[in-house]
Image (cartoon, grey):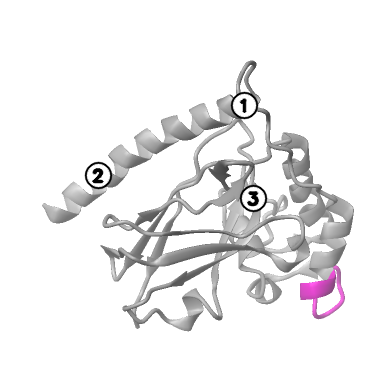
Amino acid sequence: MLGNRFDSGIRSATRGFATGAILFAVSLIGCGGPTPIAPPEWKPEAMADSAIKLFDKNGDNILDSQELVATPGLQSAVAKAKEQSPDVNGDGKLSRDEIRDHIALFESSKLGIQLISVTVLLDRQPLAGARVTLEPEPFLEGVLESASDTTRQDGTARPAMEIEDMKGVRPGIYRVKITHPDRPIPPRYNDNTTLGLDLAPARAGYGAQMPVFQLESK
C-alpha cells in the first residue's frame, strides 16, 4: 500500500507541476506578460565541433557507446525515445552532424528558461535533503549556467538558477551530480557522475520535464 500511495502522490504532483510549467512557459512568451528571458547564444556548428574534440578518442568524428560514457548529458539524449533522440539512425552513436542538429533544436526554440522537477530515490525510497546540481556539459560551458536545489521529503527538487528575478533552468545538455550531507552517495552519482539530463525543447510544444533518478547505495 505504501508503494501505491507514493506512486499516486508522484502522479498527482506531476500533473500539478506540468500545468504550472506550461503556464510558466506561456507567461514568458505571451502578450502582456513579463519580458521574455533571452535564450542562450547557441552556436551549433562550433559546439558540435567542441563535443567531438573533447570526447572522440579514435578520431572518426563519431561518439560511440564507450565514448558517450564520458558525456552523460549526450548519453542520456541517445537513450531517449526515438522521436526525441538525436540518434536519428538508431545506431547508438552520435555523429558530429547529429550533435549539431540536436543543438540547433535549442536554438530554433528560442526558449530562454524553463521549469523542471526531478525526483531522487535511494534504494527505491525518496531521498530528502539531497543536493541536486545540473552542470552544463563542457562543450556548453560559458553558455549555460548551473542550476541546483535540495530535495524535499518526497524526494523532489526543482533545480534553478536566478535570471532576472525568475527561477528556472536553461534548456540544454547537463551532467547531474547528487550529494547528501549525511547519507553516503557513491561517486558514480557525483564526482564521477554517470547521470545526465537532456533538457531539449519538446518537439510538439512546451512541456514539463520530470526525470526520476534512481540511486543505489551499493
Residue at 72% across, 43% down:
106
* SS for callout 1: loop
Q: Which mark is residue 85?
A: 3
> Distance from label 3 to label 2 (Cα)?
29 Å
Q: Earlier in the sequence, mark 3 or mark 1?
A: 1
Residue type (three-letter) at the residue carrying disc 3: Ser
How many discs appear? 3
Q: Is residue 95 left or right of residue 188?
A: right
Q: Is residue 88 left or right of residue 9?
A: right
Residue at 80% across, 74% down:
54
Counting from the top left corner in percent of width and height, residue 25 is at: 57, 31
Q: Is residue 147 left or right of residue 7?
A: right
Residue closest to the far top: 31
Q: Which mark is residue 160?
A: none
CB under 8 Å between callouts 2 and 1?
no
Counting from the top left corner in percent of width and height, residue 134 is at: 56, 61
* SS for callout 3: loop
The nearer-to-camera label among 3 and 1 is 1
In this rendering, the answer to whether 14 lies above or below 93 is: above
Whether 177 is among the magenta residues is no
Q: Which residue is mark 1?
A: 34
Q: Which residue is mark 2?
A: 9
Q: Which residues are magenta?
A: 53-61
Where, by quadrant of the figure, is residue 184 drawn? bottom left
CB under 8 Å between callouts 3 and 2?
no
CB under 8 Å between callouts 3 and 1?
no
Q: Nearer the viewer, residue 163 or 182?
A: 163
